[in-house]
Amino acid sequence: MTTVSDTADEQRTAREALRRARALLDPALRDWVRRLPAPIARVASYHFGWTDSAGRPESAPGGKALRPALVFACAEAVGAPAEAALAPAVAVELVHNFSLIHDDILDGDATRHHRATAWRVFGSSSALLAGDALLIHATRVLTEQHGPDMAATGVRWLSEATTQLIEGEYTDLAFEERSHVTLAECLAMTERKTAVLLACSCALGALWGGGSPQRTEALRRFGTHLGIAFQLADDLLGIWGDPAVTGKPAGADLTVRKKSLPVVAALDSGTDAGRRLAELYGGPDRPDPAAPDPAETARLTALVEEAGGRAWAEETAGEQLRLALDCLRTADIPPPAAAPLAALARLASRRDH
């Protein structure tokens, strides 16, 4: 039986893995951003929280560095030092932030980590180009100072993952124009948009660490299930997250009528609450995200929960976590090396921000 102490120990293990990843990653990441043309580097540095809008040094809150942490942990899981996988750790973080910058533009998000998004500060065109530059840099990172065979494999895996990520983003946007989306379609979109880059992070860490094909594939599958659990947790936060912690308004996803996994589960529930939710969600008049109606948001939130969307998402996140941990056991990783990966998986699927 899991005790409070066990949970606290795992949380400390996960946070230590994230802290170590950030400490290893940041000097190299900053170096690669400095190589960008100065106007683009200024936008990127602001996005990462290193500078303010005028280019002055700043230490704004940044991301969790989950993907680099998985790269490092998977390299260590197959017997290599974390430093051996610095290049793919930087590469996946560049791709991830390319997607964040583009997502903010596509979704019209005004804030990230409690500060204005890059496109709100510098304009959508400048932010778009900065995101593109980060993506191009990711390939360069993998091809410099590495053997041609490993570099070619790494570039192929990361390119395939990025293509699927873009496809997932396109599908997510297309869902907004459709009156009905099935749960199976939404899960498939989630795997492409979110899980595939986490899976790639795990596989690249194992590849750079010299892992066998069998272990590498098991760790890739671990990352896939972790990624789906991660997105389920993210979708739950998009409705029930604490604004003081998430940095976004309560029910933000409902305000923009996003077809997130809990919402689609509720719409597909066949319940009276699901039908009432569909009537409100499919109305001809879209609310203004800049001026949400708190009463309407509260009504939508209650309907999603009443129709079972929240319970389904929480249960499915738990099932995906279990499948991820099964893959970790299949990889036959020594317990000390497996512990950070298991802790990261649990933290990602049960986080509050």
Image: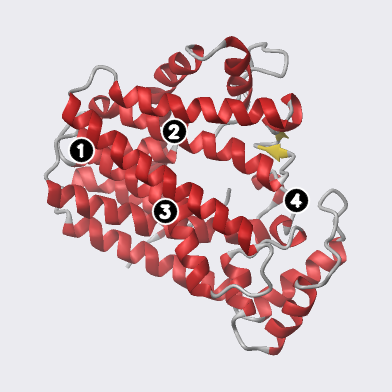
Residue 248 x %, y %: 71, 47
At x 30%, y 55%, the residue is 222
Mark 4, residue position? 249
- Choose the circle earlier in sequence order: 3 or 4: 3
Are the residues tagged 2 and 3 within 8 Å (C-beta)? no
The crowd level at tag 4 (other Cα within 10 Å; few <14, some 14-19, many 20+) is some
Mark in front: 3 vs 4: 3
Secondary element under disc 2, as helix, strand or loop, is: helix
The foreground one among 275 and 115 is 275
Q: Which amino acid does label 3 sit on?
A: Ala
In space, the residues marked 2 and 3 are separated at their CA atoms by 14 Å
In space, the residues marked 1 and 4 are separated at their CA atoms by 40 Å
In space, the residues marked 1 and 2 are separated at their CA atoms by 17 Å
In space, the residues marked 2 and 4 are separated at their CA atoms by 26 Å
Residue 129 x %, y %: 60, 27
Give the image quarter of residue 90. top left
Q: What residue type is labelled 4?
A: Pro
Mark 2, residue position? 93
- Choose the circle earlier in sequence order: 2 or 3: 2
- Choose the circle earlier in sequence order: 2 or 4: 2
Secondary element under disc 3, as helix, strand or loop, is: helix
Mark 3, residue position? 195
- Residue 264 located left or right of residue 298: left
Q: Can residue 36 be seen in this view?
A: yes
Q: Which amino acid does label 1 sit on?
A: Leu
